[in-house]
Image (cartoon, rainbow, N blue to C red):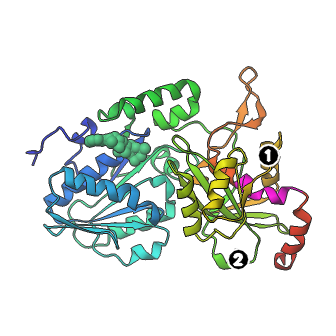
Amino acid sequence: MKALKKEPFNNWVWDIIDDYSCGTEVYYGGAGSGKSVGAIQKAVLKACNSKRRILVIRKVQRTIKESIWHLTIELLNQAGLSKSYKSNKSDFTIALSNGSEFIFKGLDDPEKIKSIDGITDIVVEEATDITLEDFTQLNLRLRPGEEVDYPQIYLMFNPVSKVNWVYPYFFVNPVDDCKIIKTNYKNNRFLRRSYIDYLNTMADKNPAYYKIYALGEFATLDKLIFRYTKRIIPHEEVKELPLFNGLDFGYVNDPSAFINGRIDLVNKKIYVTGEYVRKGMLNDEIANVIIDLGYSKEVINADSAEQKSIAEIKRKGVARIKPARKGPDSVINGIQFIQQYELVVDERCPKITEELDNYTWKKDKKSGEYINKPVDMFNHCLDALRYGLEPYMTGKTNKLEARNKPFGL
Ligand SMILES: Nc1ncnc2c1ncn2[C@@H]1O[C@H](COP(=O)(O)OP(=O)(O)OP(=O)(O)O)[C@@H](O)[C@H]1O
Ligand SMILES: [Mg+2]
């Protein structure tokens, strides 16, 4: 079968390109190591060589188009197959002329997956975003009893935290019929020089981050700041509670984070119900996201360090955006406020979950003791959460508490 040329592939991908010996393949490691490209290259080749029905999964449907969908189309075109497939952007499917199919789905609504039959392979992008229950359900779809040659599931992820299900599942006890491949940026010969330089400077500036995101190692678990529970939060359950919305700005290396939730001041619960987190967004794009998500008429508390951005977003139609008040101790006060509440996060919010699993107290370098300051990373969504909750931390609380009472039961 290897009439194939080696050039388009990284070496580690080439080594496994037609190896279907294990039912599960785990590609984990540092950012930019070529995991997503490699897994899709392998899936495309498999789909070209025999008739496959490949389900490509991400946790959240709306993140598919700009990531794994684009990548698959790009790789099909690069492979010279542009005339051998038809893509359907409205239901996110790609049909190859040999009868193979790619079906792209978000797991926001797991019921959607249950109606798809005859799946031969599954690719799970950012597998740390899904839950163990999601994974179990996916495996059931893959092995439905009918005869399929070499059914496989590929999972890609960065080692975000030992708290995440993938760590105990794949790394604590050996899993049968599973191949685990660890890579980092040094295994990707196609990377831009500037990206490699960026990762290298991270080694000094931010060693913990470097360890996870550049080297691809699971960092040891330090003292986490927040405890939380994760589940689906039905709208019906929380719709009467006061809403809060927070916005933190990023651009090139940091994402902008828009977080929504509800607060139950009587029963002391904070519900995080929505997130939109993306790098590279200009202010008008942020405004459009807020409008599209239906929050343009709501109060949004944003990072006060960016008054100009706030003004621009306001001008685009998000009328009630305003700067969160920031005192000298606002970070620690905000943390302490949130800690008094039970924090419940909707499982369709993977980015804030990732931050919660990594947001830790700083250690004093000399004594090794924890100090009363958080490590300045994994805090974009969490800063947005603090900004959003800021009105409830001040003197306004009593008034809001009164409003909240009828629903507190
Ligand atoms: N075979 C390849 N041919 C050309 N470019 C490649 C190839 N593999 C990887 N790249 C380049 O390297 C970049 C990083 O690859 P990829 O996105 O697959 O990494 P990743 O390990 O999935 O990263 P992350 O951890 O951020 O998801 C791609 O954007 C692409 O530019
Ligand atoms: Mg990737």
> Quick one: SS at disc 2?
loop
Q: Is residue 246 above or below residue 231?
A: above
Is residue 391 one of those drawn in magenta?
Answer: yes
Residue at position x 74%, y 26% in the image:
364
Residue at position x 79%, y 46% in the image:
326
Q: Amino acid at mark 1?
A: Lys
Who is closer to the viewer here, 263 or 131? 263
User: Do the residues bearing badges 2 and 1 touch, measured as CB atoms within 8 Å?
Assistant: no
Using the rendered view, name the quadrant where residue 379 is placed. Answer: top right
Q: Earlier in the sequence, mark 2 or mark 1?
A: 2
For residue 146, say whether it is visible.
yes
Image depth: mark 2 or mark 1 in front: 1
Magenta part of the chain: 385-394
Task: Report the disc number at residue 239.
Answer: 2
Q: In the shown orientation, is residue 69 left or right of residue 301? A: left
Residue at position x 43%, y 27% in the image:
197
Residue 53 in percent (x, y) is at 25, 67
| Residue linked to disc 1 | 326
Type of secondary structure dominating the magenta stretch: helix
Q: In the shown orientation, is residue 59 left or right of residue 223? A: left
